[in-house]
Image: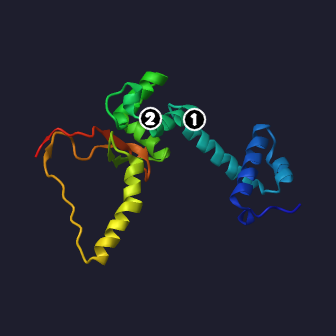
Amino acid sequence: MEHIDLRKLNNDELYAIRKQVVRLKKQGRKGAEIEEITGLYQTRISQIWQAYQARRKKDTGRRLTAEEEKAIRAVIINKVPEQLKLAGCLWTRAKICAYIKRVYRKSIVPQVISRYLKRWGLTCQRSTKRAYGQDIARIEKFKNEEYPAIAKRAKAENAYIYWGDETGVDNRENYERGFAEKGKPPVLPLPTKKNGLT
């Protein structure tokens, strides 16, 4: 019998072979029989089975099911706590724990939720601020069409463009942080009008 060299297989083929070994083991087949069916050496079959059992044992320690994890991740990405009657606009570990407690009746401490967040690809990031009244389409048009024309004219006329802004004191935190997908900072909606001291 010719044996398979796993080094020559791509990831999809490796996955299919491992899945087949696990299925045959669950059926109660012996190593020699699986070797005959798959073309793998018995030592490799044993390694695949042990890796599967170790991963399964690790997964059993989780408080949330795979379906619950998927649903919670989707909520964190697509909704803000306010929409779910939780205080604030950004997700923190405490708010995620409170949401899980309310919806799934499972108590998870913030230290443990950190492991879930890491596994879900969610990181704590500084938020991007956006005013409620902002017209995103109008801003994009200005940045991509109008301002380049202004800059081109200023260059042709050997002129300078000066930008001015007010300086002041605000009663809100400058940079709030919340959990979101890695590389996609959460958006913190703010009122267009500020209350501050200038």
> Which residue occupies the foreground of this view, 102 or 53?
102
Sequence-first disc among 2 and 1: 1
Q: Residue at x 45, y 37 (%)?
A: 76
Numbered-mark total: 2
Label 2 amino acid? Lys
Q: Residue placed farthest to the right in the image? A: 1
Is residue 185 in view?
no
Q: Say which of marks 2 and 1 sits in front.
A: 2
- Circles 2 and 1, Cβ within 8 Å, touching? The answer is no
Give the alpha-carbon distance from disc 2 to disc 1, as whole Å. Answer: 20 Å
Q: Residue at x 85, y 47 (%)?
A: 33
- Residue 58, percent across and down? 55, 40
- Residue 1, percent across and down? 89, 60
- Residue 171, percent across and down? 16, 39
Label 1 amino acid? Ala
Judge from the rendering whether residue 127 lies leftward or rightward of residue 194; answer left or right: right
- SS at circle 2: loop
Judge from the rendering whether residue 198 lies leftward or rightward of residue 43; answer left or right: left
> Which residue occupies the foreground of this view, 31 or 176?
176
- Residue 185, percent across and down? 39, 49
- SS at circle 1: helix
Q: Which residue is mark 1?
A: 66
> Which residue occupies the foreground of this view, 44 or 10?
10
Q: Which residue is mark 2?
A: 79
Residue 26 position (above or below residue 154): above
Q: Residue at x 35, y 38 (%)?
A: 90
Q: Residue at x 79, y 42 (%)?
A: 24
Answer with the quarter of the image where residue 110 lies. top left
Answer with the quarter of the image where residue 155 lies. bottom left
> Which residue occupies the foreground of this view, 195 or 11?
195
